[in-house]
Amino acid sequence: MYFWNIKQLKEDLTKGKLSEKENLKYLITYVITTGLSTLTLGETNQVDLIMSALLSALTVGGLIYLYQLNGGDNGTNFLSKYFSLGWVLILRFAVVVLPLSFAFAFISTIFLGRTLEETDYWDMAFTSVLLLVYIWRLGFHIKETSEQNA
């Protein structure tokens, strides 16, 4: 994995020398650094920090799981599948998740007496479940394309 030598990285990319496993390393590194960069040091509570760590761990674990469903080191086109299938799936999820999120917020405010001013454990649980369902569904589609190529 390259951290600074972009010239050698471009040469390896041009010659097709970057393996699926190397691409996975770049993706995991990207996800971790993106997750860290979204942490705000201003108005956060303890649940925000726990949730950020949990979602980062679930995402990295999910990437490894998806990579294995794609065939692991013998799989092909993991990043293409991850981004293209993921894009379509996230659009489909939005149609279901946005109304569900509003309903969850409304119901939990009325029946649980929650305030929506700061993140709490209900938010963390709800978001974690949604992420796991997304990873599970994406894995289904990635595995299906992997099996068709075998």
Image: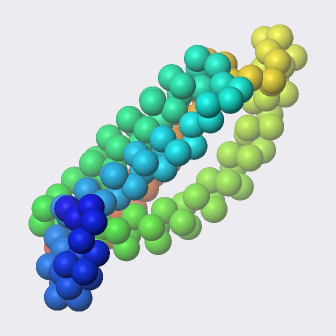
Identified at 78% across, 20% down, the residue is: 108
Q: Position of residue 15 (x, y in %)?
A: 17, 88
- Residue drawn at point x = 78 percent, y = 11 percent: 112
Percent x, y for residue 67? 26, 56
Whether residue 13 is visible? no
Indicate how the structure is coloured in the image: rainbow
Q: Is residue 50 left or right of residue 149?
A: right
- Nearer to us in this view, 23 or 39: 39
Image: 60 above or below 107: below
- Quarter of the figure with the N terminus: bottom left
Residue 112 can be seen, yes or no? yes
66 vs 119, left or right, is: left
Q: Is residue 126 above or below residue 121?
A: below
Give the residue drawn at x 33%, y 52%. Answer: 28
Going by the image, does 119 lie left or right of 133? right
Q: Quadrant of the C terminus?
A: bottom left
